[in-house]
Amino acid sequence: MTPSAPSPASDYRFLLLIIPPVFILLLAIGLFEFSSNITVDDFHGLTKRLMHSTSEALEQPFNATHFLVEVKSRYIWLTTVVVALVAGIYAFILCTMIIYQCHSRSRLQVVTAIGMVFALSGVAFIWSLDETYTLYRAVFGFSYDNLSQAGPQRIGKHLLRYVMVVVSVVNVQSMIVPVVALLAACSTLAPTISGQAPDPKFYASQMKRLKEVLTAASAILVSGILHMGAWLRWPAALVSDKAGQEAVLGTALAITLYWGVTFTLMLVATYLPAALLLARRAEALLLERPSKSAEPEPDQWLKDHGLFLSLQDHFPQFGLILAPLLASPLSSLLIAPLTPTG
């Protein structure tokens, strides 16, 4: 019996891989947004009281220790900015190339249009955030308002403007590059460009691309967590009260841990279904074709070409999936000694 011709819609079923990670992200944003019981006025009062003892300390003679600790914290944050920007550029170029290699011209136009919609929606979302949103207050506003409350003697207006620009650039990149990476992961499940029936080697090459996407996606998410941790911990260097310092560091750890778990789940929801589909498709083709004595067994062929799903064969990939989660305590270890009492 001749198999029925695939419908035009079947050429775009690979885009369904977008649904699980986007659902996890929206769920995390929703839970994070409705978890706050602090009003906007309470938020500004909190940061003002947190920096109040520092303001009193400004009347005392210049304290070189506190000054240098703040400088260290600031440059640790800038280091994570460099890492985040470089990782983002690397991931953008790599994933763009994979998307281009996986699609015909007509399909590439559709994928590009979908990517632009998602990216522009993400950028519009972050620009629409203000103090009424928990995400704004807890991630950006917490550090920025504390820096503002520290006083011009420690954090001048020119530095605040510089900080605003740098964080805005990082945030915009964080909305665009993950969209490209997600579409690149989806593209590894796309049909062949020629429209001909694929062979097992085609799925092996797609699995290789999927692993490259996972590496790039893990890099941008880990660098994002490190940047978030350094950004949230910077104000601790400006707080002279030991209990206040520990509270800031603890809050930063909790927030980065939350997003580290979210990012790890997004990687799981993207990589594992795609890898499973590629492995099953390749296995089905191997079982259908006539066996020859000179050819290896299907399981061995799958192992040799990276399509056999086991913890042993995919240990590096599982490590990349867990990397965003592990980045949260890592950022705490890197920056905690930089507090004034460290």
Image (cartoon, rainbow, N blue to C red):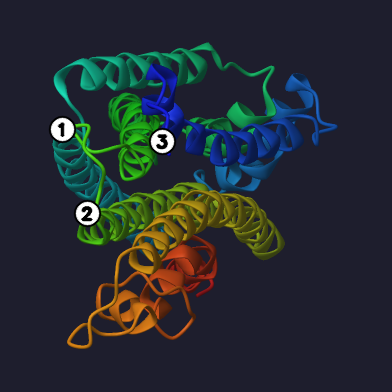
**Residue visible at 32% across and 24% down?**
161
Residue 124 in view in this figure: yes
| Residue 67 quadrant | bottom left
Mark in the foreground, 3 or 1: 3
**Mark toward the start of the polypeptide (1 vs 2):** 1
Please rate how many residues cluster around mark 2, counting C-alpha atoms within 10 Å: few if below 14, some from 14 to 19, many from 20: some
**Mark toward the start of the polypeptide (3 vs 2):** 3
User: Mark on residue 202?
Assistant: 2
- Amino acid type, mark 1: Ser
Question: What SS does tag 1 mark?
Answer: loop
Q: Is residue 153 left or right of residue 261?
A: left
Q: Image height check: is 252 above or below 93?
A: below
**Residue visible at 22% across and 49% down?**
82
User: Mark on residue 3?
Assistant: 3
Query: Where in the figure is residue 163, as x and y percent of width and height?
Result: 33, 32
Q: CA distance from mark 3 to mark 2?
A: 20 Å
**Residue nearest the observer in this picture, 23 or 32:** 23
Q: Is residue 160 left or right of residue 51?
A: left
Q: Which residue is mark 1?
A: 194
